[in-house]
Structure formats: structure tokens, C-alpha cells
Image (cartoon, rainbow, N blue to C red):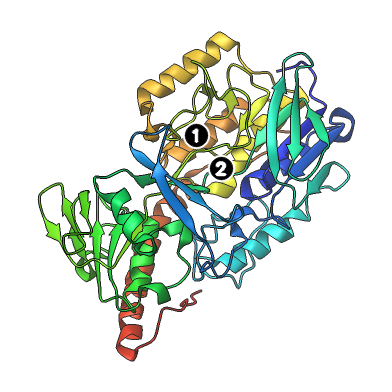
Amino acid sequence: MSSKVSKVAIIGAGPLGLGFAKAIAAEPNAKKIFNTVDVFERRPQAGGLWNHTGDKSGVTFQLTESKTNPNALKVIDNDPHLSPLYKHTETNIIKQMMRYKDYPLPEKSNTFPNRTEILDYLLDYQKTIPEDIVNFNFNSKVSSLLKNNESNKWELKIKDSEETKNYDQVILAHGHFDTPFVPKSDGLLDWFKKDPSSVSHAKYYNDVEKYRDQKVLIIGNSASGIDISTQLLTVAKGITMSCVGEPMFKGVIESETEQVDRVVKYDIENNRSVITQSGKVISNIDKVLFCTGYLYEVPFLKSYVNGPKAIITDGSNLRYLYKQLFYIPDPSLILAGLPKSIIPFPFAEAQGQYVARILSGRLSLPSTEEMYADYEREVTERGRGSNFHVMGHLKDAEYCNEMFNLIKGTENEGFTAKFWDSDMLEMRQRTGELKRERFHVLINYAKNLRAKGSPFVRLEQQ
């Protein structure tokens, strides 16, 4: 990282980008320190993925062999702005935590806010970020990001623009919900080629109509798998869930669906059947829906993607990161909000407060050797694969408080995130319990809708 950071680019104006922009703008003398702080967002407004795509019936995608990940199929779709949110999305996090510091959601918001409430909240929050420091550029899709080793600047290009912009520091805050993970399995590619409309991923799900009177196989038992299964209870002929490991919400959906272990073979020619790892056969499957999450991908990044220190390889994780943030070989590249199973808004603020102080020069990074040692310690603890970014219950709180400890001595000026005290930790604990209760309510509600012959519509709550 250069000794002086004057020009900063933030890619993404969703919850991450807004959190980082707010923290940078709050640095003492930010207007003098930062000549330029540009935020680039490919969508027409702030909010990131909370900008619901709407009808997804026109979206098409292809499954092909992956050249980089032997455990996955490559997914290519025709809508680069597609949001993974569906029509009746609600958060898995209570409104008291799905928020930024000192900026609560409106009191009238649902306990688990719906997608519209979160989008409106983010649009309002953007207005609190000083326009004389931070420039928001919408409809601006980054097509290329290249480090010029001679000038030591990042060269950034926007699609359909001939201009090249130069920056000292780049923050990637574009999220990691663009590239669906579809696990490679025997016979799946052949199934897709013969009946492509019968295979999909949660990213392309919007509502239940496509699954009416269908026997549906859902791969995955995370929150999205349970949520979508609950909605499909209203119209599907039958639902089978393939689960690997403990479900996120055990004892919620199992009695309403057939539960099987990992699917290892797809055989469309044999009664549209699949075989699980234990040898169980499920036949006459109409639709297969993958609720298997996403891979990490930075398609516009042209530097540090090859060689032994490549930041990304198979998409399961990003490598050589100090505190899951700074790319150690070149800390002028920052990757925001990579961890999974976190409370996103306070997490963005915790990271943002530390990054802002580093960029303004009020704090300094450790030596390269110290950062590598810290990274290797984290790899030993978490592993090098997909688990590297999984924090899970209360681990995100520990991380946020670690970020807080890193800024000690500088709290009196600039933005300071909320420390995870005992009240916050208790609220974090309660969130999972409340969501479990909510799922039970939704399942009973879905069963009642089915009895009435009605499809799923959102059930409001306070």
C-alpha cells in the first residue's frame, strides 16, 4: 500500500459499500485527505441485491463443465444484474440487528423485515453519507480492474465507457451472491441438457407458480432451502430435500418433506430418478432446485488472478487475506464482507471503521511478515477450503470486537462501530430462536393456504 491514499474506489453500493463509504467519509479531515472517493454501482440506485429483479421468467442460464472447480458445474446466465431475492423474501435477522449503528429501521417494520423495507432503509441511509466527500456512480458496471505496476495505481474501466480512472486504493464491496454453486454430480449435466427447464438454482427462484403440481427435489438445507420449501408447500405435489449435515433450523421442515442424504447420481432416463449416497432411489422428479449457495468470483479483476499467490482459484474462498480484508501481497486491494453466516450491517461497519483509519493514515497495517503469520494462523483454524469464510454463530461477534480492539486509541474521532456487548450477544442468540418460531408459523400458514387452493403470499408480522 502506498504511504498516501488520495483516491479511493468502492465497487458496490449495497450494505457493504454503504457501510465502508460512511466510515471513510467520517474520518477527521476526510475532505483534505481524500481527493476522490468514488462508489460504483451497476444498478440504477443503491441497495445492491436488495433491488429485487422482479419477474425472472425471461432469465436463462447454462450449465457447463467448470475449468477451475472440479467439484462444481459452471453457471452462466443472461442477466448480469439479477438479484437472488425472490418475491416474498424476508430477512433471517430481526430488525433490531439488521441495521446500522444509530440508524434503526422504522418502528412499524416487520420483526423480520421484508425486501422492500430493507431496500427503502438502504436508500434512506445512503442520503446520510456526505455528497461532498463520496461520489455515487450508478448504472456503472466495472468491466476491468488492473494494477499498473509502473504507476502503482489501479486502473478501473466502466462498461461502455472509454475512460480509464486511476485509484490508489480499491475496495471490492460487490458481495458474493452472483455466481451460483451447483455441485458436480454424476448424470446432472446430461439431465440438464435433456430437460434444462427442470433444473434451477435459488438465484432464479421468484415465486411458486413454476412448481405447481410438481414433484420437487431441493438440494440444500440452509435457510434459503427451508424458506423456499415452505413456500412450495402451498402448490407442489411433493417435496424431497437432500441434506448434507445438520440443517440450519433442525426440526422445522422435516415433517412436511421427505428428507434424504446427499444425491450422488442423476438418471433422467430411468424414471427421472436420483440415487443418494446411502442408496435410496427417488423417482418421477419433475423439478430439481439447488439451494446450495454461491461461489466467490471477481470477473472484472485482471490482476492477482494467476500464479502461486492468486487471490482466487476455484471460487470456494479468497486467499492471502489479512483479517479477511487486505490482500497481503498488495494491501491496496481490500475485499469487504467476505465471511458467511454473519449479521451483515454491523459487520460492514466493524470492518469499515478499521479500513477507514488505515486509509487515512491514523493507523498502520502490521508488517507483511506479521500479516502472513496471522493469515496462516487463521487457515490452520478454519481450513483452506469453503470453511475459511464461514464464521457462524457468535464467531462474527468475536471478529467484530477484534476489529474494535484494532482501533483502540482512535475511538474519539471518526466513525466507531457498535461493540458487541452482552446485550448484543443475547440478541444474536435470540435471532435464531425467533426465526425458528417464525418458520413454524409460516409452515402452518402455508398448509392453510394449500387447503384453500391459494399460492404463497407474504405473511406480515410485527
Q: In this view, does 319 lie above or below 307?
A: below
Tell me what residue is drawn at x 53 percent, y 70 percent.
110
Q: What element carries label 2?
A: helix
Disc 1: CA contacts within 10 A as few (<14), some (14-19) or many (>=20): some
* Most distant residue in the bottom direction: 452
Q: Where is residue 186 in the image (x, y as percent from the top left)?
A: 24, 45
Q: Which amino acid does label 2 sit on?
A: Phe
- For the residues bearing labels 1 and 2, Cβ distance under 8 angstroms: yes
Tell me what residue is drawn at x 67 percent, y 34 percent.
171
Q: Mark 1 points at which residue?
A: 399
Q: Position of residue 196 (x, y in %)?
A: 38, 60
Q: Mark 2 points at which residue?
A: 347
* Most distant residue in the left direction: 279
Q: Is residue 394 above or below residue 259?
A: above
Q: Quadrant of residue 166?
A: top right
Q: Position of residue 175 (x, y in %)?
A: 57, 44
Which one is in front, 29 or 51? 51
Q: Where is residue 205 in the image (x, y as percent from the top left)?
A: 45, 64
Tell me what residue is drawn at x 34 percent, y 88 percent.
453
Which one is in front, 60 or 434? 60
Can residue 255 be seen by looking at this rendering? yes
Q: Which amino acid does label 1 sit on?
A: Tyr
